[in-house]
Amino acid sequence: QINVQLRTSGQAVDEGVYEVALTVTVSAKIGEDRTLFLVEVAQCGIFQIRNLPEADLEPVMMIGCPNILFPYAREVVSESAVRAGFQPVLLQPVNFEALYAQRLQQQQADAGEAPTVQ
């Protein structure tokens, strides 16, 4: 059983310059409790993003930048598994736009369910 988790984060480094990190964690298990291997890769990039409305900045950092970083992280995951003596792990392409939309929907649902303070 192979489990893949993705996390993206971004922060401003300077005016118009942002660091975006894509963390990919892949674990392979036999049964419920026996871990065969665990690979975690943090692929980061420095991106210059200028002349973009503030409202469009987060989608670019959470969709566009991870799309650029993913092939490199994918290669490191596969290479790491092979170097450890396992079969290569070939991660399928990821739709970061769908993941971002799903995260926004979850945040809206959580905000809607939160109790209001009076």
Image (cartoon, grey):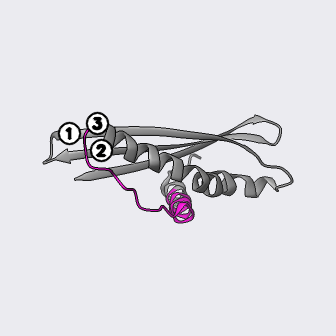
Judge left or right: residue 84 versus residue 46.
left
How far apart, in angstroms, are the residues tagged by discs 1 and 3? 14 Å
The residue sitting at the right extreme is 51
Left or right of residue 11, residue 21 in this image:
left
Could you say whether the residue bearing mark 2 is in a helix, strand or loop?
Answer: strand
Callout 1 touching callout 2 (CB < 8 Å): yes
Q: CA distance from mark 3 to mark 2?
A: 13 Å
First of labels 3, 2 by sequence position: 2
Q: Amino acid at mark 2?
A: Ser
Residue type beneath disc 1 = Thr
Residue closer to the observer: 85 or 104: 85
Q: Badge 2 local density, few (<14 within 10 Å), some, or many (20+)?
A: some
Q: Report the residue at 82% width, 56% height from top.
A: 53
**Badge 1 is on which residue?**
35
Percent across and percent down for residue 39 are: 35, 39
Percent position of residue 112, x then y: 53, 59
Residue ID at (52%, 47%)? 72
Residue at which label 2 appears: 27
| Residue that badge 3 annotates | 84
